[in-house]
């Protein structure tokens, strides 16, 4: 079950709100300018699936979504618990970053945590299959696969440029996936 924990950006010990219902998550994130919706995916895929299986199951559906929403770039996070590069990949995305173009995160299988820093609030979403978050350009965020990742997640972008570090250490002050 997806869940959203909402914190003040200055108090990381305890969230002031924890939400588990899609409608509550949608309205809370919408108030911060973030889109959230639950999608019916065209196939059931599991973390660690072959790229060919992913392309066959989701390719046309994903291309239509990207065209409709204006996304031109995609990055697939496809990791299982024993992946030899799991800790290196996890570390690469744990710091806060921002992207100049609008972006989206689509959870295809497994689970992961996406942190969002919007104004004076921090949102930690434990996302799972079917969750789609749409971030406006410049949204500060970080991504946590966990120490034992089990995630099949897409990052979609409306621009070709990769996210850049924000220089803020805020992500390290909030709970990590599995804490």
Image (tube, rainbow, N blue to C red):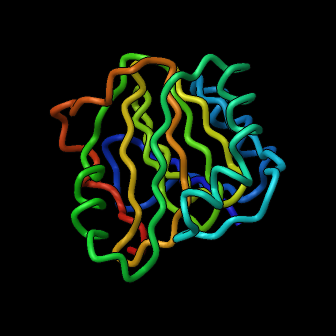
Residue 142, image x, y percentages: 36, 45
Name above or below for residue 51 compared with residue 58. below
Quarter of the image with the N terminus is bottom right
Please identify the quarter of the rendering in which residue 149 is found: bottom left
Q: Which residue is drawn at 37% across and 31% down?
A: 140
What residue is rendered at 42% in x and 26% in y?
Answer: 139
Give the x, y percent position of residue 70.
62, 16
- Determine whether 155 is above or below 146 in the image: above
Q: Quadrant of the C terminus?
A: bottom left
Could you say which is closer to the camera, residue 63 or residue 87? Answer: 63
Query: Residue 22 versus residue 83: which sits nearer the camera?
Result: 83
Which percent across, then down, holds residue 4? 60, 53
> What residue do we see at 75% from left, 45% from top?
24
Image point (60%, 57%), residue name: 52
Residue farthest bottom in this picture: 82
Instruction: Specify whether 179 is left or right of 102.
Output: left
Above or below 137: residue 115: below
Q: Is residue 48 left or right of residue 86?
A: right
Q: How many labels does the image show?
A: 0
Residue 158's x, y, as percent? Answer: 51, 19
């Amino acid at each position: 079950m997806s869940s959203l924990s909402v914190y003040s950006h200055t108090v990381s010990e305890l969230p002031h709100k924890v939400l588990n219902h899609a409608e509550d998550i949608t309205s809370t994130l919408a108030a911060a300018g973030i889109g959230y919706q639950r999608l019916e995916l065209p196939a059931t895929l599991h973390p660690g699936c072959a790229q060919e299986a992913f392309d066959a199951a989701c390719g046309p559906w994903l291309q239509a979504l990207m065209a409709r929403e204006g996304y031109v770039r995609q990055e697939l996070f496809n990791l299982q618990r024993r992946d030899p590069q799991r800790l290196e990949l996890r570390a690469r995305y744990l710091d806060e970053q921002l992207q100049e173009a609008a972006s989206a995160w689509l959870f295809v299988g497994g689970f992961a945590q996406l942190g969002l820093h919007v104004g004076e609030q921090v949102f930690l979403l434990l996302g799972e299959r079917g969750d789609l978050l749409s971030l406006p350009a410049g949204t500060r965020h970080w991504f946590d696969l966990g120490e034992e990742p089990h995630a099949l997640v897409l990052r979609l972008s409306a621009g070709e440029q990769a996210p850049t570090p924000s220089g803020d250490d805020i992500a390290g002050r909030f709970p990590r996936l599995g804490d």
